[in-house]
Amino acid sequence: DIVSRIKEFHHFKLQKNDKNDTSFYNGSADASVIIFKEPEIYSTQGDNEGTSGAKRLLFDRIFDSIDTLLNDEALGTCGSIVTFPEYFDSSEEAKDYNFQLIRPFLFRYVELIKPHAIILMDGFLKDWLFKKNDVNEDINLLKKIEIVTFPSLDVLLTAPQRKKEVWKTILDLKTKLKKRRMKK
């Protein structure tokens, strides 16, 4: 329903070529962790096909690692949300405009799925999603959710030592989710 609402919302500024095939959410309807993917324009702008493919592979590996860790402990599963569909106009003036319009749809996903944790790929997303004046009710929704930030995929591809930090963060998150589950 949310996807159809996004596609019907005529206020978004879109590219001229109508690529309307992006899925916004992948994963379980009751995921314990949701990963907010960095905007897809970051993966396509200025990248060659090899780098873009490497980013997709790296993200898939991170996602699968988290999903496997959660399933092993019966903590739940992982899901991912696209924060900025490819078919949005990615010009500078349209970017912020579209980001502000898509934000309520993203929070609606969180509200419906009720995850215990959110992982933000790229620190930019934390500022954009949570530090605006008009998100007070959204911030209240997120007070009970563990929020973790990972470096962007560009950073992880060019600085492999940062992958160790991400792995440690994943393990820390697993521990926190386990403690939360035990309290219930």
Image (cartoon, rainbow, N blue to C red):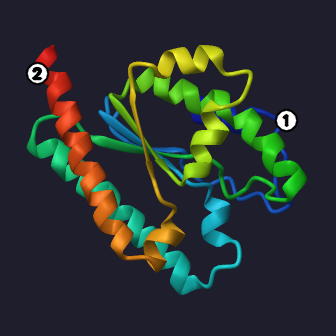
Q: Residues within 10 Å of mark 1 (few under 14, many from 20)?
A: few
From the viewer's perspective, is residue 3 above or below residue 179?
below
What residue would you read off at disc 2?
182
Q: Report helix, strand or loop for mark 1.
A: loop
Looking at the rendered image, the quarter that the C terminus falls into is top left
Residue 11: which numbered mark, if any?
Answer: 1
Q: Residues within 10 Å of mark 2 (few under 14, many from 20)?
A: few
From the viewer's perspective, is residue 34 above or below residue 40?
above
Please state the horizontal and vertical placement of residue 39, each as a whole percent of the image. 62, 55
Q: From the viewer's perspective, is 84 left or right of 178?
A: right
Please state the horizontal and vertical placement of residue 50, each as a whole percent of the image. 52, 85
Please state the horizontal and vertical placement of residue 46, each as a whole percent of the image. 70, 78
Residue at (73, 21) in percent of width and height: 134
Q: Nearer the viewer, residue 21 or 52?
A: 52
The quarter holding residue 33 reads top left
Amino acid under disc 1? His
Observer able to see residue 1: no
Q: Report helix, strand or loop for mark 2.
A: helix
Looking at the rendered image, the quarter that the N terminus falls into is top right
Q: Nearer the viewer, residue 105 or 99?
A: 99
Amino acid under disc 2? Met
State how far apart marks 2 and 1 are (Cα): 45 Å
Residue at (65, 71) in percent of width and height: 44
Q: From the viewer's perspective, is 110 left or right of 124?
A: left
Tally of numbered tags:
2
Q: Nearer the viewer, residue 18 or 135?
A: 135
From the viewer's perspective, is residue 50 above or below residue 18?
below
Q: Nearer the viewer, residue 155 or 50?
A: 155
Observer able to see residue 111: yes
| Mark sitting earlier along the chain (2/1) | 1
